[in-house]
Amino acid sequence: MAQYHNTSGCSHTIEGIIREAKKEILIVSPYLRLNDWLIELLKGTSRTLPVTFIYGKAKRQDGLDRIRELPNVEIRFKENLHGKCYLNEDRCLITSMNLFDYSQINNIEFGVEVSRAGDVEMYDSIRSDISIIERSSEFVMGIRKPQLDTKTIPALADQITMSEIWAVLGNYKYKAGVVTNEPNSLYRTICRFAYTLRDFSDSEKYQDKTGLLRTTVLTKEMGQKIINHFEALRR
């Protein structure tokens, strides 16, 4: 279940997302200016975990030099980005809060937190959309994370999740009248094709059975069949 936060709640949640991360941290915000406590917190975390910043508006910003000094960080640019989202592998916060030095002091902010444990379908939808933004953004500097190839699944990947498949296929535009380009309908169309490849348990599906949870794991071969099928329908 989603949880509402006021200004102090947003600040506390962002800190928790960073502190509690076990696999990854993604910071999506138009602006790169962070205050000192966040920089220090990320210095410790980024020694062991990959941290990705996706920012927008202007490529050259105050704060870029400080962030580039963090270990294990990747910085990416998406020009028309205006949304703000902060997430790890289990929790995310969609919020009005920018990470300016003064944002948590002078402004009235609010946001909504979604956890994988509370609402896996909503969390996976958010994470998949962030993956699309990440894939379509421009690498600026830092340590590149390996990206899922748009034509083939890496040889080392024996399994692939529906979230990773969506990160590829959700980026494409499809021929009119063949496949819908509306995101929710497109994802369910991909799921219907996946249903033809094997039987899925109810625990792998949405409650209404119209789609697969983004965490559903497929074999490499099945994932490749799905990607190849929909690549042939691109315009």
Image (cartoon, helix red, strand yellow):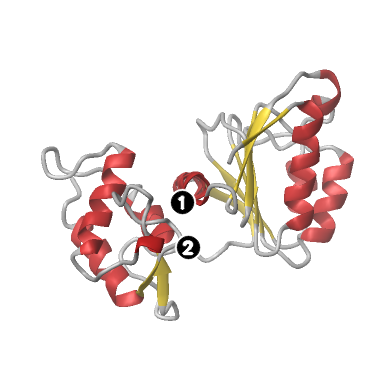
Left or right position of 147 against 66 = left
Q: Is residue 70 above or below residue 181?
A: below
Quick one: label 1 or label 2, which is nearer the N terminus?
A: 1
Task: Say what amino acid the circle numbered 2 marks.
Answer: Gln
Q: Is residue 41 above or below residue 60?
A: below
Residue at 27%, 41% in the rendered image: 185
Q: Quadrant of residue 213?
A: bottom left
* Pointers 1 and 2 in contact (C-beta within 8 Å): yes
Left or right position of 212 against 9 = left
Q: Is residue 169 above or below residue 35?
A: below
Q: Residue furthest left?
A: 177
Q: Secondary structure at mark 1?
A: helix
Q: Secondary structure at mark 2?
A: loop
Tag 2: Cα neighbours inside 10 Å, few (<14), some, or many (≥20)?
few
In depth, the one of 215 and 231 nearer the eye is 215
Residue at numbered disc 2: 147
Task: Say what amino acid the circle numbered 1 marks.
Answer: Arg
Q: Is residue 229 visible?
A: yes
Tag 1: Cα neighbours inside 10 Å, few (<14), some, or many (≥20)?
some
Residue 135 shows which numbered tag?
1
